[in-house]
Amino acid sequence: MKRDIRYVSTRSSTPSYSFEQALQLGLAPDGGLLIPVDYPNHTSQIAPYDSYAAFAYQFLRPWFEHSIREDEFRALCETAFSFPVNLIPLTGPGFGNIYVLELFHGPTLSFKDFGARFMAAMLERIAKKQDSPITILVATSGDTGSAVAEAFASKNDIRVVLLYPKGQVSPLQELQLTVARQGVTACRVNGTFDDCQALVKDALQNQTRFNHILSSANSINLGRLLPQAVYYAWAVATLGQAPVFHVPSGNLGNLTGGVLALKSGTSIAGFVAAHNRNSFFPEFLTDSNASARKSISTLSNAMDVGAPSNLERLRSMLTRKEMRSLINGVSISDDDTLTAMRSTYQQTGYMADPHTAVALASITGRDHLDQDLKRVVVSTAHPGKFPELMRETLGTDPEASGNLEILREREIDVEEIAATAAALRDVINS
Ligand SMILES: *Cc1c(COP(=O)(O)O)cnc(C)c1O
């Protein structure tokens, strides 16, 4: 019988796992991250398509060819990718050849909706087939939690426990995380994002302490990476040539999606990993002895990550030489982020949220770059998620989003816990 592509740990080449197993494992049993053994090389053969979902179906199909029926998989893609993706050319002095890839038109207004919705659809299939309920654990510095909570809220046999660091998300992000949802427990943790992430890792590695099957929806889960490869391929197909992608980066899950697209045959000229002042990865690219450290708070707080969890994956997917020739790393200060927001708005009329602005600053700050290449700024959040900051910085309100207005009417439900394994266990087993 023919099998789909298999997945192995970054730390050993055996055993290999199916996608379903990888999705439920989150982490490999040896503590490594799961990566594909090989890649389909099919992107250039994608036929004309009439919607993003139809493109996504063709891009993702080879990964699931032997395990999911064609009509079922087509419907799954239509459910997961049910919102628009836009590629907008910026026009204004100094902005030639710059495009914005808007990934924030999903229900929670960040690019995390792609991974969360695809994962939810795939896990619901799995939960239907087996008897035991699944608990999804997710550590979030903002957008992941709400995307996952929203994507899974209406799914049967799946419960979500989400952890976020107290005092380190914006009031609106907190509202998005804590509105009451069926089957979702939100925990405000007395600790940092890195603490939350460590708690999730620990729980996944000690499954026997729990009376549920645990899985993770963090960007360490492979199920989130595949759908994050699709929009890179779609943007290249739409442009008709190989651009440089400027990616607002934290845990490097989005960038890893780009590398997956490249490995699957998408023509990409290069990547710029645009980080805020949490500059470990840009330093690591030039100095392999650079060391991870505690995260610091910035305006682009969904990117406040001291030790990017997907680095181990990138290092396994690319040789050091490939990594250095393909990826440039840049660290941008809050001041330069605000300057990029203002100058982009003044020159082009385009309003970028602070995360997207870090990627914009990574272009304007590097004018020695090749001017003939097209540059795609990956836009990860809707500016309407940051109303106070947008107003202060640009002197005008961002366009409202209907999805956010609805939230204000909903009930809140949140538990506050210590950053300890015991506190998390009580929540999971309750
Ligand atoms: C999560 C997030 C990022 C960072 O993405 P990574 O995959 O962690 O690198 C950037 N911007 C926004 C708005 C996010 O929510």
Image (spheres, helix red, strand yellow):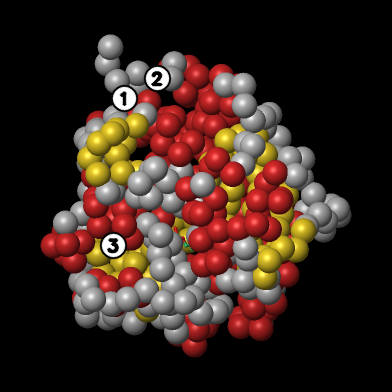
Q: Residue at x 64, y 78 (%)?
A: 389
Q: Name the residue under label 1.
A: 4
User: Which residue in the structure is indicated by mark 2?
Assistant: 67
**Residue 351 image position (x, y, % from top left):** 56, 70
Callout 3 touching callout 1 (CB < 8 Å):
no
Q: Is residue 271 above or below residue 183?
A: below
Q: Which of marks 3 and 1 is nearer the N terminus?
A: 1
Q: In which quarter of the image is residue 311?
A: bottom left
Amino acid marked by disc 2: Ser
Q: Horizontally, is 374 left or right of 250 in the view? A: left
Image location (x, y in percent) of residue 229: 37, 45
Label 1 with label 2: CB-CB less than 8 Å: yes
Cα distance in 3D space between marks 3 and 2: 33 Å
Instruction: State the image quarter where residue 307 is shown.
Output: bottom left
Q: Which of marks 3 and 1 is in front?
A: 1
Check the picture and name the quadrant holding the C terminus. top right
In the rendered structure, the answer to whether residue 25 lies left or right of residue 162 reads left
**Residue, disc 3:** 271
Q: How crowded is mark 2: few (under 14 residues within 10 Å), some or many (20 or more)?
A: some
Tell me the kind of residue under disc 1: Asp
Q: Residue at x 24, y 52 (%)?
A: 316
